[in-house]
Image (cartoon, grey):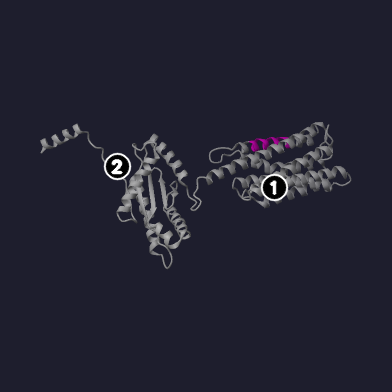
Amino acid sequence: MLSVPTLWTVFIINFLALGLIWAYVMKSYPSFAAARFWTGSAFAAAAGAACAMVRVLLTDSLVPLMLAGTTLVFAACLAAMGIRRFYGRDVSWRSTVLITGLAFVSIGTFIFGYDSMQLRMLSYTTAQILPMALSIRLLLSSEHGRVSPGARLAGIVSGIIVAIYLARLTGALLHPGGEFSFVQFNQVQSALVLVLVFLSMALNFGFLLMAMDRLRSEVADLALLDDLTGVGNRRHLVQRLTEECARSDRSGEPFSLLVIDLDGFKGINDTHGHAAGDACLQHFTLMAQTRLRPGDMLARTGGDEFCIVLPSSTLREGAMIARRVLEVCRADAEQCMGNEIPIAVSIGVAQWSRDIGNHPDRLIAAADHALYDAKKGGKNGFATYEPAAPALAPDMAELVEAALRKRA
């Protein structure tokens, strides 16, 4: 059987290593808020194990025993707060202080007021597993329609840890293998502590997988966004159009595309400078977004060109959205004063059809054709793409002409 000091040493080294790993993650990715809580949790657990080690060395004092239990409870609360912050939930320091404070008071009461190892273990175990048990459901809930492998691992490991703590509590209350305390372990209890060390590593590995999955998703999202305006870029547009074309090809339900060009943008850059041109692009983005519906997608395809994808929309509905975008730009231009630059746009509107099929470039070409018509019509307006009627075959044309003559 391993000695008690050896077990606590393993515990301390384990959590110090985890703390250093999370500290590195926290420094490398400052915006990843969950890492701060998981860093604090690891170092708090190491401090709690160190207090338990002091209790082994100073057998005359029970203060380290109370501090060890309280600090380990605080570490569990910090880990649970990190999980909540990872999923964008609010964290409550009040709950953490309440749970930690009650653990401190109850453990102290059953050390100095009424010495009872069983009640100490009941108080400590309840406070230790409560935040972890509340986090399991969150870990196993789906995010964007799926449960990440890291979250699933963390949820399963958390459940096993809770089960082990309950088994330890049962041992403390029923004495199936001798009395348990922070100072004296029997062989079964020593094995449980080693399992807890392993599970703590597995739990933090699950947290690391969660972090990697989230950071990878953020990088992928950045690759689909325009740096200047924050809306989708051309890659994102093509990806979305491909999805919409495939969906419409299966269901037959149409959707529409708007191609937008800022009128006179080159003159703005030449006269006012590129910084002013960039400000115009950003301002137009904000104005256009106020006229879109949930599910519509605005993308900047390059320079002063934008596209808007309108799912489940007919050509008429696309024209309505184009008119709304024009109206907000015109109203804004009328209010320009002094050095403010009015923004005017031309818009081409096209609707998906069976002829387009799974070819987004054909829909873009159709909307571009309508945009060209809007430009020829005097700019600061919109035009819709109306496919030409299919030409009749020569023999069919002759039959139609003969029928018309006969009817005449």
Q: Secondary structure at mark 1?
A: helix
How far from the left and from the top, in percent, is residue 178? 83, 33
Q: Quadrant of the C terminus?
A: top left
The answer to whether residue 158 is left or right of residue 115 is left
Q: Which mark is residue 131?
A: none
Disc 1 target residue = 23
Q: In the rendered structure, does residue 41 fall within the stretch colored magenta? A: no
The answer to whether residue 24 is left or right of residue 60 is left
Disc 2 target residue = 387
Q: Tell me the amino acid under the disc marked 2.
A: Pro
The answer to whether residue 235 is left or right of residue 96 is left
Label 2 vs 1, first from the N-terminus = 1
Give whichever of 41, 237 is nearer the camera.
Answer: 237
Give whichever of 148, 343 is nearer the camera.
Answer: 343
Q: Residue furthest right?
A: 60
Q: Which residues are magenta?
A: 153-165
